Amino acid sequence: MAEHPSHTDAYVPYYLHKGKYPGPLGWLLATDHKRIGLLYLACIVVFFSTAVVIGVIMRINMLPGHAVLTPQQYNAAFTLHGIIMIFLVVIPAVPTIFGNFFLPILIGGNDMIFPRLNLFTWYLFVLGAVLAIVSVFFGGGAVDTGWTFYVPFSIKTTVNVPLAVFAVFILGMSSILTGINIVTTVHQLRAPGMGFFRMPLSVWGFYATAWVQILATPVIGITMLLVVMERLFGIGVFDPSKGGDPLLYQHLFWIYSHPAVYIMILPAMGIISDIFPVFSRKNIYGYKMIAFSSLAIASVGSLVWGHHMYVSGQSDTAGIIFSFLTFLVAVPSAIKVYNWIATMYRGSIQVEPPFLYALSFVFLFSIGGLTGLFLGALSPNVQLHNTYFVVGHFHYVIFGGMGFGLAAAVHYWFPKMTGRMYNKPMSVIAWLVVFIGFNIFYFPMLILGWEGMPRRYYDYLPQFTTLHTVASVGAFIMVAGLVLVAVTLARGLFAGHKAPANPWGAATLEWTLPSPPSQEDFEEIPVVTSGPYEFDKKEAAA
Amino acid sequence: MNDHADAHAAGRVGIWLFISTEIILFGGLFLLYSMYRLKNPADFHAGSLELNRVLGTLNTIILITSSLSVALAIAALERGRRVQSALFTGATIAFAFGFLIVKSFEWSAKFHHGLYPNAKVLLSMPKGQNLFFGLYYMMTGLHAVHVIVGIGVLSVMLVRVLRGAITPHNPTYLVNSGLYWHLVDIIWIFLFPLFYLIT
């Protein structure tokens, strides 16, 4: 893609670079995009582990005869699991970790355009997380409203709702500023020759996501502020006894929170689009279609929020329009799936861990996407609304989609970020355990919901015992797999072989840098002369 | 910042994106306002009559004038007149304080009459008026927070202009602060008729 920059003897990996500040301050005051990416990574690993533990406790609770939680504790558990996973892990993870670390490099730049703003977003993120944690222990205890904070319950319950929703407001500010940084970086920092249609598709994913972050997040910001004001001063806008309309809360909440699922999935889709060509040794099929489908998902996906409110008293006309738009947004998602499969068709496929994660992403996301159509259709929704079917669908899309996409990204970029390689056979075994456990865990949820098991219930009727037990066992297998993944990566980090600059033979710019990159990335800004997946040109030049 | 990046252009893109997020933030409130006014037109009219149009008009004049003064501050800087630029920035800050003082008189008068959320007087009034005042405090309150932030931002700019950290060749921070201040002004221009001039 670009000429290999010559390295002087002064090459020092970025994490050993001696900057203005020594020791930990060199990290806490870092404005380098790679270090900020790792700061986010460290936090998100902690939050993810916490939410997984809460999830495991809930699954233990659902084993027959193992009611380890009181009903109120169970309410708090699913709420915390949701808040942590959604606002502290799934929404920020890919843009902040990999967007920060790789976006500038992928377009031939040396940093994000606003480095200090970038660090500031991390502090906002940490502040939001601290406030959320404090809200669990003070002022009435852990929130029990579910992560959706629906009124009027959230303005009546005695637990510490104001602080928790204010934490969400702060996290939203962090997300908005990250989005502004990414959009501006893509517009201003592309290297010479890096036209929009030479950008890797992961950059298109980050770019489309950043627009959603900018345009949708302020709506949840104001909604959360209104809940705070409702709780503190009783302004009445969501309180039926003062004329307020709870349905309007749901509108405002989902105007953000539905596009938010595209914040979660779009960057993962972008990275998957980078991974398939590399491991198929073939140019991507339908580059422009994938790029534009990201924008189409971002725009149409912002207009489907009403499908969360079919049974909330919204008008039939609105329901029909939102249902139509929901089916419409499935089209660009399907375009991506077809293009990924067409990319693999007649490629010379190399089965490596990132490829396996990418492949399982497509499989799991397709199940999640198709079950989404059941929910998006008006009449089945009446039966399926607020059942385990929703829980199963959501985890297939978000964990199976974004989660496996994140794992693909980790396994793909690990050698570049750390300079080391993990043990591949072990990581394939770990992947298999996670994949099998995942399906044993979540597929029964779809059946449970179909048969009428409501979500967020502490207990269940006897006929659901078998499927709940199967799901719990699947959850334990999956978590064992996650531990194996963590062990494999940790061993790779501390004892892995040194990774070469380009272990996968990829053609995007990050692989022209040494593993790991130096502090300043490119010594000279590269001049880009070919597309991101033109392996033949690259090999001819070598 | 990368070598090949144009700092001024990047700052412009960034501030416009930020301004659009602010508009959407207030957009949520305007959405609520539209729905509730549609449902309670008579109560909103009655609520509007409780507000002081003279003070509202005065505040509108103050804010529009402050937008002029911040624009003059930028124009003076671009012509290299540092002291003049600082004076206009200082005038903008003074107008902002003036706005807040008038606002606080208005709010305390309303409080005195029991027209605030959860007050017995207001609760005894129709639901639509409760919504009107709930939105009035929320929207003008959030706007006032933006005015306070603006005072902070413009004060930093004043110091930087006086110290020579902002120059005609490097005006981005002052220009962007000016854009933010115009946003604060424009939001008020919508709030004023929606609350004070309903018929």
Image (cartoon, coloured by chain):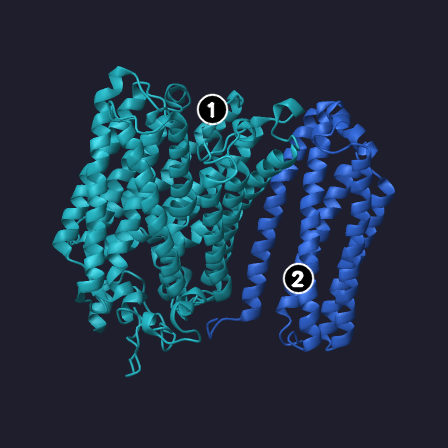
Q: Position of residue A175 (x, y in %)?
A: 48, 51
Q: Which residue is mark 2?
A: B153
Residue B54 or B113: which is nearer the viewer?
B113
Q: Position of residue A362 (x, y in %)?
A: 26, 42
- Distance from disc 1 to disc 2, alpha carbons, whole Å, reads 45 Å
Image quarter for residue A249?
Answer: top right
Q: Position of residue A308 (x, y in %)?
A: 45, 29
Residue A310's tag is 1
Q: Residue furthest top?
A: A462
Q: Is residue A513 left or right of residue B135?
A: left
x 21%, y 37%: residue = A476
Q: Quadrant of the C terminus of chain B?
A: top right
Tint applied to chain B in the drawing? blue
Tint applied to chain A in the drawing? cyan
Amino acid bearing label 2: Val
Q: Is residue A462 above or below residue A386?
A: above
> Badge 1: few (under 14), some or many (20 or more) residues near its Cα, within 10 Å?
many
